[in-house]
Each structure stands twice: as structure tokens, then as C-alpha cells.
Amino acid sequence: MSKQKLTTKEYVVPFTLISSLFFFMSIMFPSIFALGIKDLGPKTKKASSIIVMSIVGGALFPPVMGWIANISSMLVGFYAPIPFFCVHPLLCPLRLQNNF
């Protein structure tokens, strides 16, 4: 079975979709921040600092994705954030249980 290489034209749709995904995730931050610190009372400062620190992941992870893409393939590079998306739903019940 031979591998078929994709042409530049065939990369346009996947690239556009992934770029738009990152765009819409970035404009969600103000809403996430506001809802994340709503009604926390004395825990507001701690919660806001944790949310702001999460931005660092968005700054540090793209080079990691690029490194993974360089040593394997672009497809594998874009699969790299999936574990983080899988861990997030596991942490939500913890927040509800600890009331934070």
C-alpha cells in the first residue's frame, strides 16, 4: 500500500478548520474568565490567578506541537492537545466536589 501525498489545495480545508477552531477558542477567554470567577467571594483572587496562568499553556504548547510535527507528522502534532481536552472533563467534578 503506497502513501498518497496531499497537495497544497487539499490542505486548505483542514488548515482553515483548525485555524478557525483556535480562533473561536481564543475569543471564549473573556467569557470563561468572567464565569470562572463569578460568585467566588474570598476565593476570587486565587481563581483569577489560576485562570490567567492557564494562558501560558496556550503560549508554550504550540512550539511543542511543532516539535512533535517535525519529528513525526503534522497530523500527529495536531493530535497532541487531545489528552488535555480529555483531562478537563475529569477535573470539573473535582471542582464541584470541593466547591472551588
Image: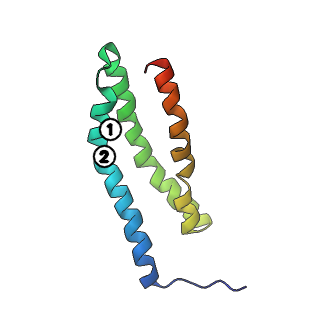
Is label 2 in a helix, a strand or a loop? Answer: loop
Residue for point 47% across, 25% down: 95
Give the colour scheme of this rendering: rainbow
Q: Is residue 18 left or right of residue 87?
A: left
Q: Position of residue 25 (x, y in %)?
A: 35, 51
Q: Does 36 sit above or below residue 97? A: below
Residue for point 45% across, 55% down: 62
What is the crowding at mark 1: few (fewer than 14 residues within 10 Å), some, or many (at least 20)?
Answer: few
Tell me which corner region of the image, top left, top right, bottom left or bottom right, holds residue 57: top left
The residue pinned by badge 1 equals 32
Q: Three-letter amino acid code at disc 2? A: Met
Q: Three-letter amino acid code at disc 1? A: Ile
Q: Residue furthest right?
A: 1
Tell me which corner region of the image, top left, top right, bottom left or bottom right, holds residue 3: bottom right
What is the crowding at mark 2: few (fewer than 14 residues within 10 Å), some, or many (at least 20)?
Answer: few
Tell me which corner region of the image, top left, top right, bottom left or bottom right, holds residue 24: bottom left
The residue pinned by badge 2 equals 28
Q: CA distance from mark 1 to mark 2?
A: 6 Å
Q: Is residue 8 left or right of residue 24?
A: right
User: In which quadrant of the rendered image does the C terminus lie?
Assistant: top left
Q: How many marks?
A: 2
Q: Position of residue 10 (x, y in %)?
A: 46, 81
Residue for point 45% across, 48% down: 60
Judging depth in this view, the residue of 52 and 43 nearest the camera is: 43
State if disc 2 and disc 1 touch (CB < 8 Å): yes
Residue for point 40% across, 29% down: 50
Q: Residue furthest top?
A: 42
